[in-house]
Amino acid sequence: MTKNLKSLLIVGCDGCASVIQVGGERQAEILKSLLEMERKVKGEEAPNVKAISILRQCDRQITSTALKPLIEDYDAVICLGCGVGVQTLADLYKTKLIIPENDTKFLGMHDTNADKFYEMCRACGDCILFETGGICPITRCAKSLLNGPCGGQSKGKCEVGGWKNDCAWILIYNRLKERNRLDLFTKFRPPRDYRVSEHPRELGGETEEEEATA
């Protein structure tokens, strides 16, 4: 994607991408070195590459302020943030080529000892974690069941994925039992109102007029 580009601005993010070491200042500098090395090995002219990192690419104002003195000096921007960062940059600089470096998978928890990421939340806007012992059935149950377990579990494992993953509802049962709150387990949860999860969503910034008519 960077072939024939003479100047590149590599933009890392000091937010989540930096914490999990896929897009912070260090990664931006490493990518800069790799791009320069590639051109050198191929005997091509060295590109003008600058690597920086900004506080949070998901914040429009922070990103705009940080890049304003630099953006026009480069043919393209390589974004080391998440998908939100890429879209923020693309929206701010509509005529500039924005190149995503990362594939954003999900909102997850990082276990550094196991070196694994686990999807934990879908940001659905209708949280029931209080009722489920802090275990999200929408995300961690393969069928996103609100009441469980279903007939597709055996010995605490889920049929989806070949009996490798824990059944979320067995985990919920065990957690609530430990807390002596099995009343929450047997509580019937009616079908969800998925209108709160419709895409695209937005939050905040209501005007006084909008609030009055709400």
Image: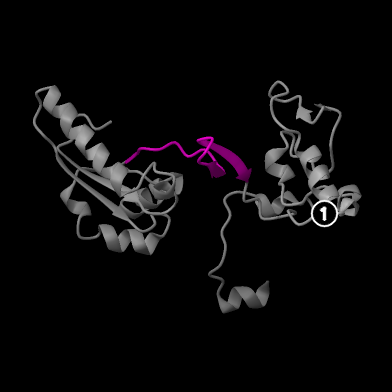
The reply to whether residue 94 is visible in this rendering is: no
| Residue type of the residue flagged with mark 1 | Arg
Left or right for 187, reference 44? right
Q: Is 200 a magenta residue?
A: no
For the magenta stretch, what is the residue range? 99-121
For numbered disc 1, what is the local secondary structure? Answer: loop
Image point (59%, 39%), residue name: 118
For this rendering, which residue is in front, 174 or 152?
Answer: 174
For this rendering, which residue is in front, 91 or 83?
Answer: 83
Left or right for 36, reference 195? left
Q: Position of residue 62 (x, y in %)?
A: 35, 62
* Quadrant of the image occupied by residue 54: bottom left
Q: Position of residue 2 (x, y in %)?
A: 24, 32
Q: Position of residue 183 (x, y in %)?
A: 91, 53
Image point (36%, 37%), residue name: 101
Q: Is residue 123 above or below residue 116?
A: below
For this rendering, which residue is in front, 146 or 169?
Answer: 169
Figure quadrant of the N terminus: top left
Q: Is residue 123 above or below residue 100?
A: below
Image point (9%, 23%), residue name: 43
Figure quadrant of the C terminus: bottom right
For this rendering, which residue is in front, 140 or 88?
Answer: 140
Left or right for 152, reference 212? right
* Quadrant of the image occupied by residue 139: top right
Q: Which residue is mark 1?
A: 179
The reply to whether residue 49 is visible in this rendering is: yes
Left or right for 70, reference 188? left
* Quadrant of the image occupied by residue 166: top right
Mark 1 surroundings within 10 Å by alpha-carbon count, few (fewer than 14), some (14 through 19), many (20 or more): few
